[in-house]
Image (tube, rainbow, N blue to C red):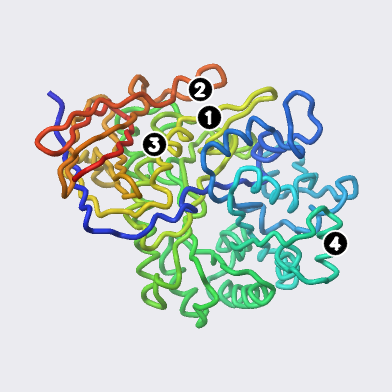
Amino acid sequence: MSPTDTVRVQTHDEIDRVNPNVHGHFAEHLGRCIYGGIWVSDDDQVQTTDGMREDTLELLSDLGLNQLRWPGGCFADDYHWRDGIGPREDRPRRPNDFWAQGQEETYEESNEFGTEEFLRLCRHVDAEPFLAANLGSGSPEEARRWVEYCNNEGDTALTRERAENGSPEPHDVTYWGVGNENWGCGGRFDPETYANEFRRFAHFMKLAGAEETVACGHINEDWNRRFFAELTEPDLVDHLSVHRYYGRFGPDCGSATEFDREEYYRFFAHSLQVGTDIDDAIATIDTYASTDDIGIAVDEWGAWHPEAESENGLEQENSVRDAVAAAGVMDDFNHRADAIEMANLAQAVNVLQCVVQTDEEAAWPTPTYQVFDLYQPHAGATALRTVVDTEEKETDIGDLPLVSASATVGEDATYVTVSNRHRTDERMVRVTLDGEVRDTSGQVLFSDHDPSDYSARDNADEFTADDAEIAIEDGSLVVDLPPCSVAGVSIEST
């Protein structure tokens, strides 16, 4: 008989609205994310719109992308936005120093895909743009002019140039990152130096119309505390970033598709660090300001396996294990809906834990794509306090709850997502609400797959959801979850 776990949804204990930007993504000039995955210019092997692949655009549009961060990543602090505007034939080719590391050939940036192309992409897929300004090798003046180019509605030299480039109306970009990982690839700043640079950049960017800024945070809380202590003007910060990759930068978790039992569970345990990082960042913010005024932006997160190296453009297979781990992270986001305001999975296409993969002729969704699709009803709904009573698996980096869950309430129903992290065993999960369950419907992902299975062009359709087996017993519902699977259940109650 399957073990029984209980998920108690406290329908009268609301946390906050789940900001749709939490279901965001990230696109960097790295490997085949932009070039080949999104932008193909005049390539006649695939259908294009404005130089972008229609198959990729369709998949991203259907997913509900909500927010897209660009151009980096490490690339952002070596990117000068003026290189990517104007006639493409006049745009300079530049070396891309970051992603040339470890490669025999020089990696060059053509700048075919720039500001106008990115903002056009966001319109095509109905995503909020999130631009990362160059603090590492740029200047406050350069960042301030980029804001003016994008957002100013007056009659200035830059707004005229924007009109000449096809955009007479302002782009109204709300979210602006002030550098990226400036403790590392973005300039190797100490927190005090970054605080002083941030103050200069953010001041002039806000004057030019940057409505919301994102400060570079660190998973080292001492770094964050020293940043805020030196900054002295927390009103310049609207969001503090958290970056967390799991799988490679930590304990041995195997590869994307090859792992033993210990590595399997260790990977899930490592993914729990995302929630811990958020809690640490919240504590720091509350020491110097308030999370009522400064939100959390987990603007890079996801699985990063050892096989993803610079020489292969950080590409890796995307397995069922990766997708189920992502479901647990998204549950953790829902649990912290009162603090987290945006999140960006790395990366949207072809790179790391992407949601879309491509070859020269086709694009297809990954298992992680299916999880994001299953979680769409959470976006914009109100998160509810959820208590999970489940067995824990002991690992050498901490205990792992074998069931993860979260719940939101929308206009018509309560939506619960629940995942079974056990590698081999089915689990019976009982979901209880304050009221009596009246009607349910649901879907389950990966019921017929091994955790190491991954998507390819010829099998991607096999990872779509099946109808979930749900029973109503004594006013609550019971769902049987296969090993390493995720379910989404819509519940009407009295």
Residue 402 x %, y %: 24, 38
Residue at 52%, 81% (x, y): give it. 233
* Residue 79 quadrant: bottom right
Q: How far, Cα to Cα, is label 4 from label 3? A: 50 Å
**Toward the viewer: 364 or 315?**
364
SS category of the residue bearing label 2: helix
Q: Amino acid at mark 1?
A: Pro
User: Mark 1 or 2 closer to N-term?
Assistant: 1
SS category of the residue bearing label 4: helix
Residue at 20%, 46% (x, y): give it. 388
Residue 442 x %, y %: 31, 32
Q: Amino acid at mark 2?
A: Ala
User: Mark 2 or 4 closer to N-term?
Assistant: 4
- Contact, CB < 8 Å: mark 1 with mark 2? yes
Residue bearing the label numbered 1: 365
Residue bearing the label numbered 3: 253
Q: How far, Cα to Cα, is label 3 from label 1? A: 24 Å
User: Mark 3 or 2 closer to N-term?
Assistant: 3
Q: How far, Cα to Cα, is label 3 from label 2? A: 25 Å
Residue bearing the label numbered 4: 161
Structural crowding at the residue carrying mark 3, measured as other residues with C-alpha within 10 Å and reported as few (<14), some (14–19) or many (≥20): many
Structural crowding at the residue carrying mark 4, measured as other residues with C-alpha within 10 Å and reported as few (<14), some (14–19) or many (≥20): some
Q: Quadrant of the N terminus?
A: top left
Structural crowding at the residue carrying mark 1, measured as other residues with C-alpha within 10 Å and reported as few (<14), some (14–19) or many (≥20): many
Q: Amino acid at mark 4?
A: Glu
Residue 476 x %, y %: 15, 38
Residue bearing the label numbered 2: 460
**Which numbered disc, 3 or 2, marks the residue closer to the eye?**
2
Question: Looking at this rendering, what residue extends furthest in the left direction?
Answer: 474
Relative vertical location of residue 335 with respect to residue 203 in this rendering, above or below: above
